[in-house]
Amino acid sequence: MRRALELAERGPARGINPRVGCVIVAPDGAVIAEGWHRGAGTAHAEVDALSRLEPGAARGATAIVTLEPCNHIGRTGPCAIALIDAGIARVVYAVADPGDHSAGGAERLREAGIVVEGGMLADEVEAFLGDWLFAARHRRPHVTVKWASSLDGRIAAADGSSQWITGHAARSDVHRRRTAADAIAVGTGTVLADDPSLTARDDTGALLPEQPVPVVFGSRAIPPHAALLRHPHEPVLLTGADLVADLAELQRRGIRSLFIEGGPTLASAFVAAGLADELLVYLAPVLLGGPMLALGELGVASIDAAHRYQLADVERLGGDVLLVAHPRPTEGN
C-alpha cells in the first residue's frame, strides 16, 4: 500500500479527480504491474496498471489501491468492472470513495465473488487525500478565512491605509499559503477599493509556479483595468447571494480548497454561515482604533450564540503572531 501511495503522488495535486495509485500482485507475491491516475480524462490507476499486463495475466492476482475502486461511468468506465473482467481475485484499498456516483465499487466487487478488504493505511491515505476527501464528503471546498489586523482587530487606519500592518515574514507566509490553495477569493468591494492581483509571489515579487484561481464574490462589475484580470487564471465570478450554492459550483470546477482574503464583508459572511473551516489571523503589535474592523456583523445576539473556535497553532512570524483556529466540535461530534 505504501508503494501505491508513492505512485499516487505522481498524479496532479489539483483538479476534480483524486490522486490514486495501484499495485497488482501475483498469487506468488510478485509485483506484476503498477499504475497511477494522471488527471481527468486519463485512465484511472487500476486501469493504468492492468493495461501494462498481457490479457489473462491478472487472473487470481491482488489489486492494492489507495482509494476504493470507482463504480461509475464518467470519462472512463468503472474500475470495479475492469478489475472483475481482468480476473482479479482480491482487492485491498485504504479509503472508501465518498462520491455520490462513484461509491459502491467494493460492494460490486464482492457481488462478483472478489475478496475485498478496506482500511489498510487508512490514516496515511486520509492525510494524503485530505483536501479531495473533504470536498467530496462536504460537496464544497475546504474554506480558510484569513485576515491581518492590529491587536485591537483593525485591518486599516481610519483613513483606509493598510499597507503594511504586518511585517515581511507574515506576508511571505500568506503567499506560501496562497500557492497551496486551489483558489483565492475576495469580494467586489475589495476589488474596487484595493485592486488586488490575487497572485502568489516569492520574496522578489515574482510569481510562484503554482497560482490559485481568482474568485470574486459580489454583483458589482469589475473594472476592465483590474489587476486580477491579468492573473494567469481566468477569474471565476460568483454572486455571493447563496454561498452554499457558490461553493458547490467551485467544487464542481475541481476546486478543493478556497482561501478567503477579504474583505470584512466576505469574511463575516462565511463565518456567520458556519462555512469557515479554518481561521488564519495575523496579529501585528500595533493599535489603530477607528471603524475599520476585521469582521462585521455575525448575527450574534448573545454570548451563547458566539461562533466558537479552538486554537490549533500559534506561530511567531518576525514581530507578528499567527493564530490558526478551527471550529470547535459540537456536542456529539
Image (spheres, helix red, strand yellow):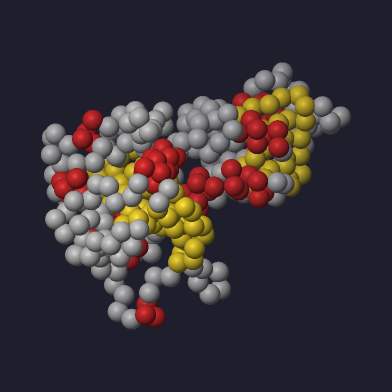
Name the residue at 24% across, 47% down.
Answer: 163
Considering every residue shown, the one lying at the far right of the view is: 28
Name the residue at 86% across, 29% down.
Answer: 28
Q: In which image quadrant can residue 8 be found?
A: top right
Q: In which image quadrant can residue 209 be found?
A: top left
Q: Is residue 132 visible to the viewer in this orientation of the structure?
A: yes
Horizontal side of 150 relative to 126 (left or right) equals left
Name the residue at 59% across, 47% down.
Answer: 127
Name the residue at 65% across, 36% down.
Answer: 5
Relative to 289, is 192 above or below?
A: above
Considering every residue shown, the one lying at the far top of the view is: 54
- Identify which residue, 60 or 167, lies in the foreground: 167
Residue 305: % across, % down: 37, 77
Relative to 275, is 211 above or below?
A: above
Relative to 327, is 80 above or below?
A: above
Residue 332: % across, % down: 56, 73
- Identify which residue, 301 or 130, lies in the foreground: 301
Q: Is residue 242 visible to the viewer in this orientation of the structure?
A: no
Residue 217: % across, % down: 25, 50
Horizontal side of 50 relative to 322 (left or right) equals right
Horizontal side of 151 relative to 114 (left or right) equals left
